[in-house]
Amino acid sequence: MNTARAWPLVLRLGTAQTLAWGSTYYLPAMLAKPMAQGLGLPEIHVWTAFSAAMLLSAALGPFAGRAIDRWGGRPVLMGTSLLLAAGLATLSQTQGTVGLALAWLLIGLAMGGGLYEAAFATLVRLQGTGARASITGITLIAGFASTVSWPLSAWLEAEFGWRGACLGWAGLHLLLGLPLNASIPRAAAVLAPSRVAQVDPAPASGEGTPAPPRYTAWILSYVFASTWFVSTAMASHLPQLLVASGATLAGAVAIGALVGPAQVAGRLLEFGFLRRLHPLLAARAATLGHPLGVACWMLLGPVAGPVFAVLHGAGNGILTIAKGTLPLVYFGPNGYGQRQGLIMAPSRVAQAFAPLVFGACIERWGANALWISSALGLSALACLLWLRTGPRR
């Protein structure tokens, strides 16, 4: 697929991903408290249901990826638009704990085949090994999901209540998300079925090129799980950490607001300078972002908070792209969707438990809990240093 045809597709997929992330991953930040109050439940019930949805999405990811390998992303992503609309509509009508859990499980079913991994697999199914630039483009657009969704959710809740907000998101999936995903080209028109293979236990990386070591998938799985744990923990607890280290609440909010733009800046860097490098080298540099930021913060105190936010955000932005490009570089496009689902499943589990586990660490050690997240980042770097770049695709 040439550039002229690729970028309209990237714009459509990126917009649909912004909608998908904003109405799932970023939804509880704005609606968990009013939802719990409206149902007369402790807020932890909402977060527990959300974690269950994340665990379900981890279990279903490989199956969604396999479906994309077989039929392309268009029918899978269209199906998730319908499921998300149904789940959010169900959530708007729930009256208790059981209904809350069932609604979030329906949303989790859609998340298993409707977030980044599915979008990446869709691009690889259409573009093969040339999908790196398109993967970066999608993350650039969807990187503004929180920037768009948090104010929109807050406005909908203020005007129509949390039930109206959920119904509003459901309507957006039907009126915007579904048509955008329906506009994705059919895979058969771009990539012949003969070029799509089932996952090989030891897939070759190319003609005349030896297959990567069998531990490569395990290493990538650990790297993505550990870095996504850190990312989710920071998204949940960064203001609390900043206040614990001596920053004012207003300062903590201002510093936290730097993370989003820094993520987009990191993705722009990857799209520009770093795209000339092997994705492994970019990923190694990105894993250093959080540990370096922690070192500055712990040595200099709250005054270094903006430096931490920029380093952490930029590294996280580049690693989001690496989650799509590294499996493509090492294993190729054949069976990419199913393999991507398997590699990323532990990341979803880590994501589900990160707020609770890291919150407990903060309660016990305060800001010193950052040494734990820093150690996880350094362990990811050590694992990536074990891999070799090999021949470029």
Image (cartoon, rainbow, N blue to C red):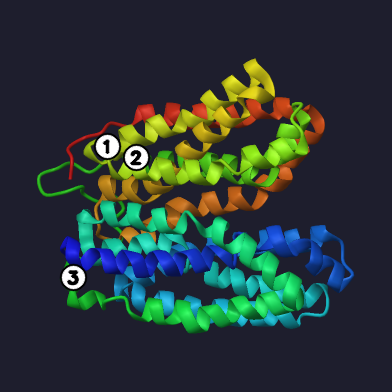
The Cα atoms of the two marked residues, 3 and 2, are separated by 30 Å
Mark 3 neighbour density, 10 Å: few (under 14) some (14–19) many (20 or more): some
Question: Which residue is tagged 2?
Answer: 269
Residue visible at 67% across and 58% down in the picture: 51
Considering depth in this image, is 202 or 161 the residue closer to the camera? Answer: 161
Residue visible at 74% across and 27% down in the picture: 245
Q: Position of residue 239 (x, y in %)?
A: 71, 40
Secondary structure category for the residue under label 2: helix
- Going from N to C along the chain, the mark reached first, 3 or 2, is 3
In the depicted structure, whether residue 161 falls above or below residue 217: below
Secondary structure category for the residue under label 1: loop
Residue 87 visible in the picture: no
Residue visible at 40% across and 53% down in the picture: 140
| Left or right: 184, with 55 as reference point | left
The type of residue carrying mark 3 is Leu
Q: Quadrant location of the N terminus? A: bottom left
The Cα atoms of the two marked residues, 1 and 3, are separated by 29 Å
Secondary structure category for the residue under label 3: loop
Q: Tell me the quarter of the picture where residue 86 sits.
A: bottom right
Q: Tell me the quarter of the picture where residue 101 sits.
A: bottom right
Considering depth in this image, is 140 or 355 the residue closer to the camera? Answer: 140
Q: Position of residue 52 (x, y in %)?
A: 67, 62
Question: Which residue is tagged 1?
Answer: 273
The type of residue carrying mark 2 is Leu
Q: Position of residue 386 (x, y in %)?
A: 36, 28
Question: Which residue is tagged 3?
Answer: 191
Label 2–label 1 contact, CB within 8 A: yes
What residue occupies the far top of the structure in this picture? 299
The Cα atoms of the two marked residues, 2 and 1, are separated by 6 Å
The type of residue carrying mark 1 is Phe
